Image (spheres, grey):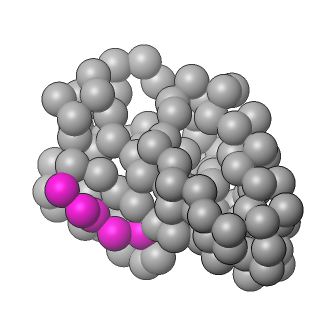
Amino acid sequence: MSLRERHCTHGAPALGATELRALLAQMPQWRLEGEHILRSYEFRDYRETIAFVNALADMVHIENHHPDLTVRYRHCIVAYTTHSAGHAVSLNDIICAAKADAIYTERTGA
């Protein structure tokens, strides 16, 4: 089952360094920065950026796993960490990152 097909689970533990590296290798546009994984998504204009943010909001509501967002005119930075895992990266973060990538691809064709 692909990451996009999985769902977040309550109480997901922090990933070990080896497992995190292996999972991030599958998603090269995401990077580890401190306690977060993050990615910047680029858009043509503000309307496209906000449409992505709204689609992302629908997904994270279903998964009950919410990122930090930085929204600009033509891009949005999405950052995930799991507070209940000691502010570390968990499988929930990876699952939602993969789902965010799918939303981006679906909306932009990129």
Q: Nearer the viewer, residue 72 or 104?
A: 72
Depicted 77 relative to depicted 81: above or below: below
**Left or right of 58 on screen, residue 92:** left
**Which residue is most to the front?**
73
User: Could you say where residue 19 lies in the image, as x and y percent from the top left?
Assistant: 24, 56
Which residue corresponds to the image point at 17% horizontal and 29% vertical from the top-left? 86
**Residues drawn in magenta:** 30-34
Horizontal placement of 86 versus 42: left or right?
Answer: left
Give the main secondary structure, helix, strand or loop, of the magenta stretch.
strand
Residue 32 colored in magenta in the image = yes
Q: Can residue 39 be seen at all in this image of the molecule?
A: yes
Q: Where on the picture, by quarter, is residue 43? A: bottom right
Q: Is residue 57 left or right of residue 19?
A: right
For the image, the number of numbered tags is 0
**Spot occupied by residue 1 in the image (x, y as percentages of width and height):** 60, 50
Q: Is residue 58 left or right of residue 20?
A: right
The question of residue 68 being in magenta is answered with: no
Q: Is residue 42 above or below residue 13?
A: below
Q: Position of residue 110 (x, y in %)?
A: 74, 81
Residue 18 against residue 66 in the figure, above or below? below
**Residue 8: x %, y % from top left:** 51, 31
